[in-house]
Each structure stands twice: as structure tokens, then as C-alpha cells.
Image (cartoon, rainbow, N blue to C red):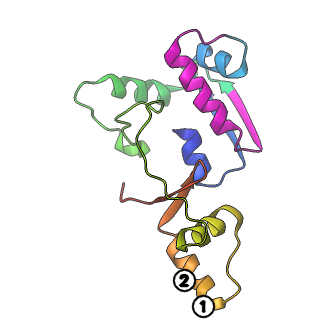
């Protein structure tokens, strides 16, 4: 989820921290991901990492990261209490689940202009049209080269 957020924010470089030696070892290639579920997460992570110029991975010892411990504890509570102070969102389904989506592939319509602006900063030559695209683009985001309308959450 962190990589997706960084990508949506158009970050070029990112530092990923985890207290899990196993996860960091699998990401760096030091350990093998044997379970099917972990292999899917690793594949997804590798796809997302390719979108950045530079990504670093660091293991933070658990005893040095009280915030991570509190998040982990709150995530294990059955009443799904949210940690509001950190503005965390509750992820209701695993990132590796495949959802049925209906991306629209129109390259001559209004979406292509917004996609072009969000991805490459290109605008139409007409100043009025460029202004409309800039204004409309604030309602959208690009994830994995697909255009999505932003929601309230």
C-alpha cells in the first residue's frame, strides 16, 4: 500500500522500512519466498518497484520502532479500531487479490488528455482547453498506468 501511495504522489525515490527481517530479506533476494501467498506479494512489490527511479529497503529493529508495534497491535484487535492519529486507512482486502475492473481504453477521448497530463505533464495547445484539463485532472489519479477517479476516502 505504501508503494501505491508513493506512486500516486509521483515520488521518484522511496525508502521502505519494515521490522520483519524475513520480508526485507525476501524483497532484497536474500531469502526465498516459498509460500504462494508471499510469492504473489513479492511479484506485486517487484512490479510496483519498477515504477520508481530508486527504492531502498531497511529493516528497523522492532524494539526501536514503537509506532510499528502499536500499529501491529491495533491491527490485531477484533473491533477494527483505527489509529486516527497516524491517519491510517483500514485495508479490507489483501493487495494480491485480483479485482474485476473495467478500465476504459480510449486514446482519442477526454480521458487520454487527463492521462497525458497526469503522467507526462502534456497539455493541449489551446489555453482554455489546457485550463479545463488541469482543473479536471485534480479529480483523478493514475495507478499502474490506469486512470482512476478519486473518491472521498
In this orientation, does residue 63 appear? Answer: no
Look at the image and give the residue range highlighted in magenta. 32-57
Q: Please provide percent x and percent y for residue 151.
A: 38, 59
Quadrant in which the C terminus is drawn: bottom left
Judged from the image, the secondary structure of the residue bearing numbered disc 1 is: helix
Judged from the image, the secondary structure of the residue bearing numbered disc 2 is: helix
Residue tagged by mark 1?
128
Mark 2–mark 1 Cα distance, whole angstroms, equals: 6 Å
Q: What is the crowding at mark 2: few (fewer than 14 residues within 10 Å), some, or many (at least 20)? A: few
Q: Quadrant of residue 62?
A: top right
In this orientation, does residue 39 appear? Answer: yes
**Residue 38 shown in magenta:** yes
Tally of numbered discs = 2
Q: What residue occupies the far left of the structure in this picture? A: 79
Q: Quadrant of residue 128?
A: bottom right
User: Viewed as shown, does residue 124 lie left or right of 149?
Assistant: right
Q: Which is more toward the observer, 85 or 46?
A: 46
Say if mark 2 contacts mark 1, CB within 8 Å. yes
Residue tagged by mark 2?
132
Amino acid at each position: 500500500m505504501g508503494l501505491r501511495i508513493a506512486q500516486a504522489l509521483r515520488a521518484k525515490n522511496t525508502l521502505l522500512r519494515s521490522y520483519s527481517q524475513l520480508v526485507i530479506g525476501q524483497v532484497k533476494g536474500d531469502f526465498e519466498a516459498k509460500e504462494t501467498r508471499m510469492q504473489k506479494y513479492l511479484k506485486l512489490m517487484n512490479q510496483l518497484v519498477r515504477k520508481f527511479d530508486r527504492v531502498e529497503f531497511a529493516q528497523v529493529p522492532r524494539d526501536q520502532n514503537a509506532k510499528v508495534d502499536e500499529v501491529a497491535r491495533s491491527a490485531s484487535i477484533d473491533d477494527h479500531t483505527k489509529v486516527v492519529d497516524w491517519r491510517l486507512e483500514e485495508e479490507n482486502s489483501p493487495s494480491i487479490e485480483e479485482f474485476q475492473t473495467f478500465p476504459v481504453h480510449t486514446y482519442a477521448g477526454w480521458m487520454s488528455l487527463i492521462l497525458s497530463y497526469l503522467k507526462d505533464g502534456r497539455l493541449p495547445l489551446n489555453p482554455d482547453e489546457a485550463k479545463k484539463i488541469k482543473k479536471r485532472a485534480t479529480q483523478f489519479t493514475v495507478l499502474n498506468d490506469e486512470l482512476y477517479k478519486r473518491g472521498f476516502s
